[in-house]
Amino acid sequence: MRDLFSSIVSGGEAEILRLVQERTQEGVQLEFKAQRLNRSGGLQDEDAVNLGSTLSAFSNSMGGLLIWGVEAKKDAETNIDCASRIDPIPEIDRFKSEVVRRVGQILMPRNDGILVEAIPSDSKEGHGYIAIFVERSERRPHRSEAKGDKYYYKRVGDSSYAMEHYDIEDSFKRMTTAELEVNYTFGRNVLRGDGIPVDGSINIHIYLKNELSTSARFPYIYLTSISRANHSNYAVDGSGKYGLPLREDGGTLCFEGGADDIIHPGTRRAITSVNVKTNITKIDTNTNKPNSFIYSIDFSEGEYVTIEYQTGSEHSRAKTGTISISPREMATFIGETYLRNDLIVAARRNSEGVGSQVLYP
């Protein structure tokens, strides 16, 4: 459903019309809704109940996508609800604002894995649709807090149903799993006399952080691809001792923790570093600023450092992602850390043949 959500956000109303023309069926992870009282951009009580029950059901099941502004009717042959016609919502910006506000209030506990986007209508000015992507939650069960409808819901087929007592009891007994996030920081370098890093490189330190309230046991992270950088043999602190034991599997760097490697809630662990080699060169005096110089780094503006990874821990689902670091971000780090008074430009040519672009400030 994440791919469909992205397609709708990028494709706009045309993508929603396609779903209607193809009579796309609702299912375990897809729901269409029309605004109850289609007069203004306000979120009516019945709309709030629909929002709460659907978000609760998706969060407690496999996640899903709610598209608001499309009417669904049962197909005569399959008896399954299908997208039948568009019904754009008036005052779409106001409606989105109210939905975003309610999303943060309408589930107990809150599900932070919910994305809300407004899709403007091409045919009706000021009208549009709302696409809401819901991640399956590891904090389930979630109860709807809509007025007069404080129930736990689950998704069955193309409908949301209030959970029975035994469903709720089983959900509370289910083990809560940790969720590890991958983040990074830039590391400081040994400097030359002119304030430039000695080896002309930038260190990027990679961390695992536990965002939830359950300890992450047997944590791991696999670095499956590293572009425009090299893995460092010196780890984060320069000792060569990584945050988790390392083994190599072909081109993949596998950092895998054992029984004693626990990342506790709200803490992070430094895992390893990569090194970005770049020539930082003084090329001219900056005539627009006294006592200032122009430096170049050998990157073009669109040349990113990318690190693809997979991470997880005991009982959690594997999660994949990519760290993308732009030359502008690296130049900003260099400038704010070492060359605050100076100008930094990209020295390589981009696809349009431009000789240099200002990256910092």
Image (spheres, rainbow, N blue to C red):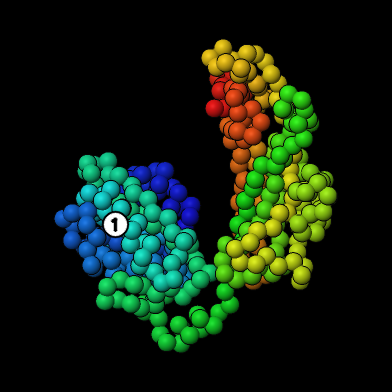
Report if residue 350 is visible in the image: no
Q: Give me the residue at 41% from left, 72% from top.
A: 108
Of the pair 337 and 302, the residue shown nearer to us: 337
Query: Where in the figure is residue 329, as x and y percent of width and height?
Result: 59, 35
Query: Where in the figure is residue 127, as x and y percent of width and height?
Result: 24, 47
Q: Give me the residue at 55% from left, 79% from top.
A: 174
Q: Is residue 245 left or right of residue 125?
A: right
Residue on which the image places disc 1: 98
Q: Give neighbour class at mark 1: few <14, some 14-19, many 20+ (Cα, 10 Å).
A: some
Report if residue 181 is visible in the image: yes
Of the pair 175 and 189, the residue shown nearer to us: 189
Q: Give me the residue at 61% from left, 17% from top.
A: 291
Question: Which corner quadrant of the image does residue 116 belong to?
Answer: bottom left
Image vertical order of residue 19 relative to residue 263, above or below:
above
Give the farthest residue toward the front.
291
Q: Check the picture and name the quadrant holding the C terminus.
A: top right
Query: Where in the figure is residue 226, as x and y percent of width and height?
Result: 71, 43
Question: Which corner quadrant of the image does residue 232 belong to?
Answer: top right
Give the farthest residue toward the left.
39
Of the pair 266 and 11, the residue shown nearer to us: 266
Under circle 1, the secondary element is: helix
Amino acid bearing label 1: Glu
Query: Where in the figure is residue 80, as x and y percent of width and height?
Result: 34, 68
